[in-house]
Structure formats: C-alpha cells, structure tokens
Image: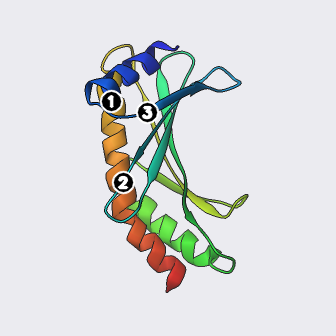
Amino acid sequence: MIDSTHQFIEALKSKEIKFSQDTTDSGKDVVSVSFDGNNISPIKMLFFFGTDSQDVSLQCFNVVKVPEGKTEAILKAVNGLNAHYRFAKFYFDVDDNTVTVQMDACFRTHDVGEICTELMIRCIQIIDDSYPSLMKALWA
C-alpha cells in the first residue's frame, strides 16, 4: 500500500468513515467512500493515489446522466459551475453522457490524511450544492 493511501485510510478510520480500498492495474491505490447529501444520494468518491505518494485525484463519476438532446444545456451548466467553484472541475463525458466532478491535490509526506479529508468534505458540499443547478439544466 502506498504511504499516502495509508495516511488517508488512518484518517478515515479515526473518523469512523466506511471505505473500501483496491489497486489499479497500473499500481495506483484507490479508496472509495460514499455519502448522502441533502440534494443527491449517494455521492460516491474515488481517490486515486499516485504511486510516488505525492498526489491524489478525487473522481465522482456519474453525478448526473444526461438525456439525449440536453448536451448544450448541460455544457452551459457545467461551464457555469466551473466558473463558480474554485477547487472542483466539472466535465461532461461524451462516452457515457454523464457529468463527472474531479479534484486534484499534490502533497509531500505529511498531512496527507487531513488534506484528503478536506478534499472529501469540500467535494461533498460542492456536488450537493451544484446538483439542483444540473437538474434544472436537464429539465428546464
């Protein structure tokens, strides 16, 4: 297990947050957590830790499924959210017609658990707060 992954897992355990852990074919550790928001449930996050223990990519896939004919509306909504939020990146995945939210962080060997926990909390709040805007774009 990569050291950064271990530090994050220890932080999750100390807060009694349930998680699962796996490794990708390329050797990256993946930690999965899931939360219920006020506007959307569940919010599933995957943390992909770099093999050098110096970075993480947090991915929330399939935040919304975009019906046919709504691409233009969702692109405008995603663009607006990207302009509004500082730490999160929203994008429309043309392969499966879904919106994904991504956050990245770099770090050294200390405070990894705290950094990743803060990313997780920010991501939950951003997705939960932005979900009504995404739904409005889809159904307006």
Quick check: 33 left or right of 72?
Answer: left
Q: Earlier in the sequence, mark 1 or mark 3?
A: 3
Q: Position of residue 129 (x, y in %)?
A: 33, 63
Q: Nearer the viewer, mark 2 or mark 1?
A: 2
Q: Earlier in the sequence, mark 2 or mark 3?
A: 3
Residue 110 drawn above or below residue 49: above
Label 2 to label 3, Cα distance in Å? Answer: 14 Å
Q: Are marks 2 and 3 in contact (CB under 8 Å)?
A: no
Decide which of 75, 83 is in the foreground and name it.
Answer: 75
Secondary-structure class at tag 3: loop
Residue carrying label 2: 36
What amino acid does circle 2 point to?
Asp
Residue 121 in view (yes/no): yes
Label 1 to label 3, Cα distance in Å? Answer: 17 Å
Quick check: 7 left or right of 58?
Answer: left
Secondary-structure class at tag 1: helix
The residue at 42%/63% (across/down) is 81
Mark 1, other Cα within 10 Å: few <14 / some 14–19 / many ≥20:
some
Residue carrying label 3: 19
What amino acid does circle 1 point to?
Ile
Secondary-structure class at tag 2: loop
The residue at 36%/60% (across/down) is 128
Residue carrying label 1: 115
The residue at 70%/60% (across/down) is 96
Q: Position of residue 39 (x, y in %)?
A: 36, 65
Q: Position of residue 49 (x, y in %)?
A: 52, 26
Locate residue 10: give its quadrant.
top left
Decide which of 120, 80 is in the foreground and name it.
Answer: 120
